[in-house]
Amino acid sequence: MLSPKRTKFRKYHRGRLTGKIYLIDKVVFGNYALQSLEPGWITSRQIEAARRVITRYAKRGGKLWIRIFPDKPVTFRAAETRMGSRKGNVEYWVAIVKPGKILYEVLGISESIAKYSLKIAGYKMPIKTRVIVKI
């Protein structure tokens, strides 16, 4: 699973998911991309599951770029613990995604396979996504 090697602080506030992506995110590296349509948190496990789907359909051909990285720790308090008494332990890491963010890009595979694999990868995400083509 993806996680940062080191961070400035061990634990962070949860924050809010407001606004769109500041600049229009474009397809930079590949020819086809998976773009988010909603805000949300994507866990490192979900990123890995989608990566496996795309590489399975590519069958050793082409190249894949993952454009998001889980850099926010999510903590949970132990069950049956009283309120107060510090923040819980880090359970997993998430990537913060806003509408318009490019999640994955592929290059070097046929259009039908690229679109199909990205569509299946979109089903692994907790947010709505769409497949876009580089102009």
Image: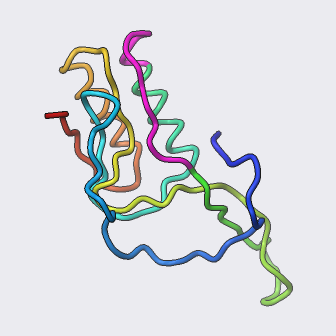
Q: Position of residue 71 (x, y in %)?
A: 61, 55
Q: Count of labels shown?
A: 0
Q: Quadrant of residue 45?
A: top right
Q: Quadrant of residue 21?
A: bottom left
Determine whether 92 is above or below 88 in the image: above
Determine whether 50 is above or below 80 in the image: above
| Of the pair 18 and 53, the residue shown nearer to us | 18
Residue ranking furthest to the top:
60
- Whether the magenta-drawn stretch holds residue 22 is answered as no
Indicate the quadrant containing the N terminus: top left, top right, bottom left or bottom right. top right
Determine whether 120 is above or below 125 in the image: above
Q: How is the protein colored in the picture?
A: rainbow
Indicate the quadrant containing the C terminus: top left, top right, bottom left or bottom right. top left
- Whether the magenta-drawn stretch holds residue 68 is answered as yes
Q: Is residue 61 left or right of residue 109?
A: right
What residue appears at the point 55 percent right and 52 percent down from the top-left corner? Answer: 43
| Of the pair 83 and 134, the residue shown nearer to us | 134
Determine whether 74 is above or below 31 in the image: below
Q: Is residue 1 left or right of residue 95?
A: right
Q: Quadrant of residue 72?
A: bottom right
Q: Position of residue 110 (x, y in %)?
A: 22, 15
Residue ranking furthest to the right:
85
Q: Specify the segment rendered in magenta.
A: 56-69
| Of the pair 75 and 96, the residue shown nearer to us | 96
What residue appears at the point 72 percent right and 59 percent down from the top-left corner? Answer: 91
Q: Is residue 24 left or right of residue 84?
A: left
What residue appears at the point 42 percent right and 63 percent down from the top-left corner? Answer: 40
Q: Position of residue 63 (x, y in %)?
A: 41, 20
Q: Position of residue 58 (x, y in %)?
A: 37, 16
